[in-house]
Amino acid sequence: MKGAQGSMEEIKEFIRQYKGAIIGLIVGIVILITGLDKLIIGLVVVAIGVVVGNYVQRNKEDVKAKLKKFIDRM
């Protein structure tokens, strides 16, 4: 029985060490199975759009100058 207990301790240590990766794996599998990946990608794209729009609105003059400089290079 001593060998089984040693093995259990090794398994517990493995789980303790890689708990985050195991949880991430399970969440990833659930997302893929349920098709939520499309929703998550859509939400990320919308969030990026909000951040970019907010940045442009707050820094209009700076963005105009950078955009003009970029267009002039072309």
Image (cartoon, helix red, strand yellow):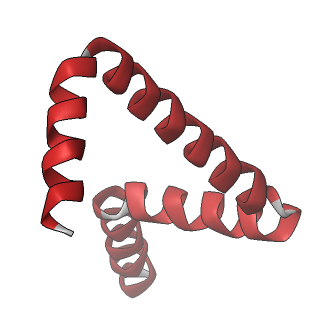
Residue 52 at x, y percent in the picture: 40, 33
Among all residues in the image, which is located at the extreme right?
A: 34
36 in relation to 25, above or below: above
Among all residues in the image, which is located at the extreme top?
A: 58
> Considering depth in this image, is 40 or 20 the residue closer to the camera?
40
Q: Is residue 30 left or right of residue 17?
A: right
Q: Residue at x 13, y 49 (%)?
A: 69
Q: Is residue 17 left or right of residue 34?
A: left
Residue 16 found in image quarter: bottom left
Residue 57 at x, y percent in the picture: 37, 17
State which quarter of the image contains the C terminus: bottom left
Residue 17 found in image quarter: bottom left
Q: Is residue 5 left or right of residue 45?
A: left
Among all residues in the image, which is located at the extreme bottom?
A: 3
Q: Residue at x 16, y 41 (%)?
A: 66
Q: Residue at x 15, y 26 (%)?
A: 62
Q: Residue at x 20, y 20 (%)?
A: 61
Residue 39 at x, y percent in the picture: 76, 50
Residue 2 at x, y percent in the picture: 36, 80
> Considering depth in this image, is 31 or 5 the residue closer to the camera?
31
Q: Is residue 35 left or right of residue 74?
A: right
> Considering depth in this image, is 61 or 5 the residue closer to the camera?
61
